[in-house]
Each structure stands twice: as C-alpha cells, then as structure tokens.
Amino acid sequence: MTIAIAFTLAALLPASRPPDLAEDWKQDAAHFLSEVERLHPSPWFGCPREQFMRGLDEFAASCKGASEPRALAEFMRLTARLSAQGRDGHSAVWPMQSRYLPLRLYGFEDGWFVVGAPEAQREWVGARVSAIGGVPIEELCKRLSPLLTRDNDWNLRSKLANALVCGDILAGVGALADRGRGEVELEHKGAAKKLPLELSAGNLMEMFGRFPLAPRAGARWLEGHDASWRLETLEAEHALYVQFNEVAARSSSGQSLSEFAAEIVRRVEEQKLTRVIVDVRANGGGDNTTFGPLIKALQNPAINRPGVLFGLTGRYTFSAAGNFVSVLERDTKAILIGEPTGGAPNQYGDAETVALPNHQTVLVRVSTRYHAFGKPDDTRLTHEPRQRVLLRSDDYFAGRDPVLQAALDFKLPD
C-alpha cells in the first residue's frame, strides 16, 4: 500500500527540469558581466561596453543547440574581448576538469614542436606538429587565439601552448569530435605520422606553474628553475650569470633577495667581472613589491654601465617579472636581449576568482588592479629588446642558447 501511494504521488509531481544549457550559460555570462564591473578597475579599456553587450547577445544566440565544449569556447571568446587591446593577460577563463593530449608543445620561431611527453610517447619529442584533429596547426592557432586573453602576442603564444592540448577547448573549436581521444599529425626524422592519442586528466600545476621547456645538455638557462634565483660565474667570459626565476622577498631556501643582491655586487667587485647578465626568461612573476634590492644592486657603479649590464627576456617574462623589466629598463643602463616580454610595461593584474553559478568547474579570473611601472603614458604592449633573438627548435634540441650567447658577444657601436 505504501509503495503504491508513493508511485501515485511521484506520478502527480512535476518532472525535474532538465538542464537548459543555453539558459545556464546566459546566467553565467550575466554574472560575469556584473563581477567584471564590480572588480575590474577599468573593465572597458580594451572593449567598449556597447561592443561587449553586442558580444553578449551573440554569445547567447550561439549557445542555443550548442554542445558544452562549443558553449565554453564561445564564453571564452566573449571574455577575451576584455583584452582586445592587450595588457590584461591576468584575466582568464579555463576548464579545470578538462582532459589533455599527453604532449607538451612549444611554438619556436620555426614552428610548433613536441618538447615533452610521457614514456609511451617519448620517441616523439623533437617532432614538428603539423595538425591536430585534422586541422592544420596554423589554422588551429587562428581559431584558438580569439578565445584567449593576453597582454600581447607573446603572452598569447605562451597560452596557445596549453590550449592546443586541452580537450574541451579543442572540441569547442571543432578540432576534436571526442574529448577523450584525438589524432596528432607529426613530422619526425623525415617521416609523417598520424598519432592517435588518449586524452587524460592534466596536472594543472605542471602545465601552468612551471616553465615548459625541459633541460637540455649544455643549456644553463634551462637548469635550476626549482630555485627562486641563482648565480654562476662564467670565468672564460668574465661574466656573472644571474638567473632570477621568481619575484619574491625570500627564496624557498630562506635566502633574502637583499642577501642575493649583495652577493652579486660582491662577486663582480672581487672577481673584477665585466658583464652581468640577468635572465628573467623563466620568471612568471610573484610579488612586485619585493624586487627593489635587486634593482639597487644593479645600479652599483661597477655594474650599471652600457655594455656591462644585460637583461634576457622572453614570452614567459610576465606579471611581476614584467614590472621588474619595466624598472630595469627605466632605472638602469641594462641592454635587453631575447624575445619581447609576455608582460606589458603597464598592465592589469592581481586577479581574483569569480565563481560561475552553473559552471563551477570553469575557472574565471578577473583583474582587480592596474600596475603602472612604466611611464604613465607608456602604451607599449611589450618590452621590445634592443637585440631581438628568437629561439629556433634546432637550437633548443641541441642545447644551444643563442640569447645568452648574444649577450656575451654584444659590443657597443664605436
């Protein structure tokens, strides 16, 4: 009797509402809009509000009948409008529970290559990537670029390396039909190969928290990234190589930046070194209130001279490291060599997390502060080195460092 009554009551109750993907994403987008206007110091600096609202309407229309990956991609496209003029790579959207291709990619000057892989795919390290999911790599980058916030094109290039292996994002732009598997087309040792791969859960700290290039024999700049900073005297070149990997008051070993800075000056003076090379290519940022002691040390008269002090920069020089380069450029006679920085001289940062009502596994970050370490009227999107030196795949895989070599070979014009 009780069971029969229960079934009768269940039949009379309204059925639970099936998820409405379009409505859920519409609510999430409205919440994002309100949070951007609450948190961001200048939300419409890169995209007028009227344009964003038109984009919001386009997003809502695109969600009707769309799959979750497609809706996610369109939401990323909407939010990336905020950085259409650059300088806001800290704001971001990312699917936190996505699965990934088991390859680490890097965009060298001569193309995209596999730079890391688990044991089962280790033989493909060094292969050029020609297509993913049947989409040529250049076309795929064009599809992905409008979905990613950036300070500049170099910051975008670093983010593309992660988007190119993210299953949800690849599915959202039509490169994968199945978020659990995909095919990568490679060129290696003169042969082409279509490599079917299973996607797996990714270690996000490995992907986003560490410099992507693994050590190669002979390349000192790829060593020691587990340390906040380190020194090495290059005796044959009478140079001091300073690797500054994290903007912090103290290293993980407990040494203060002030102590490290004093050691730089001591070595230069005692060993009568003629070059000081500060490498921030692997420095993704930290606390921009802490680098003052290092700048002060580099202003020492024995160091702060044209042709003596150099800064090595790259696409992963971002956030507080970009702020450091702004001050290095402004307050010393350092000569910059390498790639342009991923961080803009003046940039938005200090991002806070925004929880979406209906998609809480999608990470959303919104910048909350403007950092003007450059001049107030500095509208540059990157620090352009005095000598641009771009890394090619053959240099990396052979363990050569053309950027450091350029600094060691640099001569001032007569």
Image (cartoon, rainbow, N blue to C red):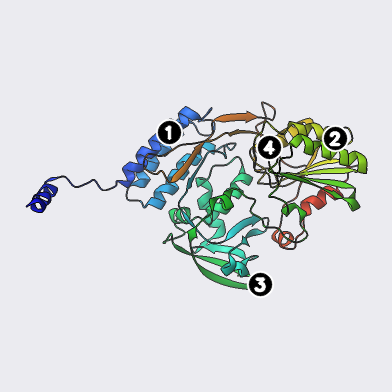
Residue in front for this viewpoint, 73 or 319? 319
Give the left or right position of residue 291, taking residue 333 as reference: left
Which residue lies under the disc numbered 1? 33
Kind of residue at disc 1: Leu
Locate residue 361, reporting x and y percent. 43, 46
Instruction: Say which mark, if any, is on residue 189.
Output: 3
Residue at horizontal 41 percent and vertical 39 percent from the top: 356
Residue at horizontal 43 percent and vertical 38 percent from the top: 355
In the structure shown, which secondary structural element does the residue marked by tag 4 occupy?
A: loop
Disc 3 and disc 4 in contact, CB within 8 angstroms: no
Kind of residue at disc 3: Lys
Disc 1 and disc 2 in contact, CB within 8 angstroms: no
Quarter of the image for residue 379 reads top right
Nearest to viewer (mark 1 / mark 2): 2
Residue at horizontal 69 percent and vertical 30 percent from the top: 374
Q: Which mark sits nearer the N-terminus, 3 or 2? A: 3
Gap between marks 4 and 2, in whole Å? 22 Å
- The answer to whether residue 329 is seen in the rendering is no
Instruction: Say which mark, if any, is on residue 248.
Output: 4
Locate residue 118, reporting x and y percent. 58, 64
Instruction: Say which mark, if any, is on residue 304.
Output: 2
Nearest to viewer (mark 3 / mark 2): 2
Disc 3 and disc 2 in contact, CB within 8 angstroms: no
Kind of residue at disc 4: Ala
In the structure shown, which secondary structural element does the residue marked by tag 2 occupy?
A: loop
Q: Count neighbours of disc 2 (C-alpha within 10 A) and say few if under 14, some if 14 to 19, many if 20 or more.
A: many
In the structure shown, which secondary structural element does the residue marked by tag 3 occupy?
A: loop
Give the left or right position of residue 292, taking residue 75 as reference: right
